Image: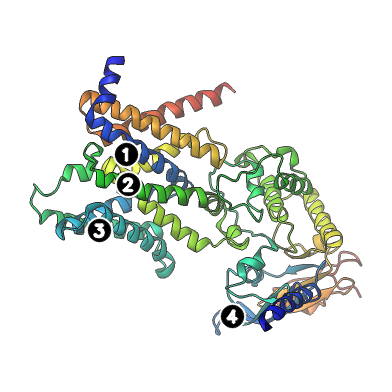
Amino acid sequence: MWRVVATPYATQFRHIAAMTSPVISLSHINFGPSHAPILEDISLELKAGHFMGIVGPNGAGKSTILSMLTGRLQPDSGHIDLFGECLKRFNRYRLLKNIGYLHQLHDYTPNLPLKVRDIVAMGLHDYAKPLWQGFSSTSHQYTDIIQALQYVEMEHLVDRDFRHLSGGQQQRVRLARALVRKPKLLLLDEPAAALDSKQQQKLYTLLRQLCDTQDIAIIMVEHDIAAITGHVDSVACLNRSIHHHAMKGEQIPEDVWHQMYGQHMHVIAHDTSCIGCHHD
Amino acid sequence: MIEFLQQFFTSPVMQDALPPALFIAVVASSMSVMILAHRLSFLTVGISHASLAGLGLAIAFSLPLLPTATAFCVAIALLLAALPKQRGISEDTGTGLLFAGSMALGIILVSQVSRNQVDLFGLLFGNILTVSTQEWYWLLLIGCIILFAFITMARAWWSIAFDPITAAASGLAVSPLRLLLYGTVGLSVVMCVKLAGIVLTTGLMVLPATCAWLWGRSLMSLWLLSMGFAIIGTFIGLLFSYSYDWPSGATIVLTLCIMFIMSWGIAWLTQRNK
């Protein structure tokens, strides 16, 4: 009797908790050996619709944070909450269904004969279904694939062989694969690396729109703070630990840059809207 | 020609050999697509040679031949899947290590039994013409398991072959799926050893999809083309084997090689004329 009554309440509570709680909550995360830690005491919260950029030097642990959020790496200590639930081995696959991920390790692209639509289809929740259940061009999955390709202006190449695309076009198709699953959280590791400046700006504008209109939370690792500053809500400065988390309108003090990149660097101000610059 | 074909189809040996040979072709060509996608050609070499140890154990301890070889091959395949991650050994090194070790063990075991007890030529180069009813049932069982695994997991395996990091991040259980893939490849190798022997198994596991790779544009088209090439190659190979009394496994593999060369030539000419 108790079980029958308790289950719906438990489900309801979990649902309400998931709606009100942050999309991501990292609490005192440590990772790596104690003599050379990769991440130290990382605490971070991200609400739905928030667009956060992470900047930092090479080896700062930016990609490691994203790998932890996708469950590929386990922290040595600390706590990760995703969508109001503690990320554990048993619920990992369920929670990951709400995440779109674009990693930076695209040096090796296997020589598989695949059309653009096949790549995007791989992002669908039910892609790994048996072969007798196909993806016909009239199915709603196909509509989703086309919509995702429209976001990145690649719908006209839907039937093109992926191997024949340029690096920038391939990157846009990979982004469409991350978007086709309609994620609540997007994790992007240097998504603009292979794009020209025009496509970079289009990408950032699209990501801003996704946050505003669909309440998607985004974490984006980037090196060029000046390029993203007009689009993001906040910037976290990471070098093993978070040295500063600047919100929109706030400026990052010069000593934070020195802590991250060393004393030899000089900060050059862009304009007053730039989060990264300090204006006297 | 018609008379020859009539003879071929009514021959009791071919009536027994054709169904298992074509069935093995269908199963091997299906897995062939995944072997190429995941770059597991060397793994098939390793497992097929390691199967000699399984066969040697079966002969030495009077165990059923195919089931013992099957268990051994799957165990070796799973060990190879787990070894690199656990010990920091590259997959190539691990395969070479187990391949040489198992082969050495197999040679020692087989050398201890009399020549009458073991058909060494059949083990090394295959002999589908002497498949017993019991062996045929065993091949049917493991073949159906492989085909079921392929049909249900092909898309997941395909996605992992393209990008394992994103596949894992999107909720696919990459490690268990990879283990299943290696185990299924192990099973497929055992089937092919019966048809093409330890030495030529890799040809049967790699060539059908290699031919299809030149024409296929999706997982489905690759699979169907790979099966088509394997069925035609096996049939023509058996025809020649019957006609000239050549070893069946070697003739099939050679036919598939010729088909690949022709396929590559036609693909090259088509590209050039575009």
Q: Which mark is nearer the camera, 1 or 4?
A: 1
At 81% from the left edge and 62% from the top edge, which residue is drawn? A228
Q: Which residue is mark 4?
A: A37
Q: Position of residue B9 (x, y in %)?
A: 29, 25
Q: Residue A184 versus residue B165: which sits nearer the camera?
A: A184
- All told, the count of numbered labels is 4
Mark 3 surroundings within 10 Å by alpha-carbon count, few (fewer than 14), some (14 through 19), many (20 or more): many
Label 1 secondary element: helix
Three-letter amino acid code at the position of disc 1: Pro
At 69% from the left edge and 76% from the top edge, which residue is drawn? A85
Circles 2 and 4 on the same chain:
no
Circles 4 and 3 on the same chain:
no
Label 4 secondary element: loop
Q: Which mark is nearer the camera, 3 or 1?
A: 1
Q: CA distance from mark 4 to mark 3?
A: 42 Å
Q: Earlier in the sequence, mark 3 or mark 2?
A: 3
Q: Position of residue B197 (x, y in %)?
A: 26, 43
